[in-house]
Image (cartoon, rainbow, N blue to C red):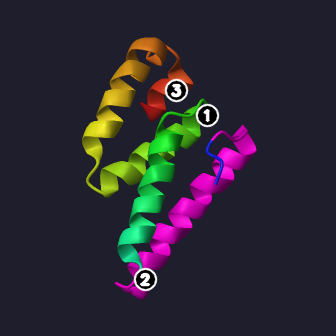
Amino acid sequence: MNLTNSAPQSAAFFLATILMLTTLQISGQDRDETAVRDKALKILRHELNSDSFWVKVHAAEFLISLGQAKEAETVFLKELEMKGNIPIQRIGI
């Protein structure tokens, strides 16, 4: 997987990650859970640092739900400094 994608491809990877996590929660399979979780976290962490603001917001939401709040907090404190005065983005921050 190439993690240097355009915005549409980044959004597609992000959605695929959500699907992987949802599938794990529904199926309850332990067999490949660690590998899938690691791959999903890698994608979410990548998207957390993407240029697409709303993809970044949703990646942060999922990282928080997976117990990775500190990573999201670090990124969004910087976002608050840079974009906190832009109303449409302040909503996401």
Q: What's the residue at 60%, 63% (across, down)?
A: 16
The reply to whether the magenta stretch includes residue 18 is yes
Decide if residue 30 is on the left or right side of residue 13: left
Q: Which residue is mark 2?
A: 26
Tag 1, which secondary structure? loop
The quarter holding residue 7 reads top right
Q: What's the residue at 46%, 25% (across, down)?
A: 90
Q: What's the amino acid at mark 2?
A: Ile
Cα–Cα gap, marks 3 and 1:
11 Å
Q: What's the amino acid at mark 3?
A: Gln
Q: What's the residue at 43%, 17% (across, down)?
A: 84
Decide if residue 88 is on the left or right side of residue 59: right
Where is residue 73 shown, x and y percent of the image? 30, 33
Tag 3, which secondary structure? helix
Residue 89: assigned label = 3
Residue 52: assigned label = 1
**Badge 3 local density, few (<14 within 10 Å), some, or many (20+)?**
some
Where is residue 27 shown, x and y percent of the image? 43, 86
Q: What's the residue at 57%, 42% (across, down)?
A: 55
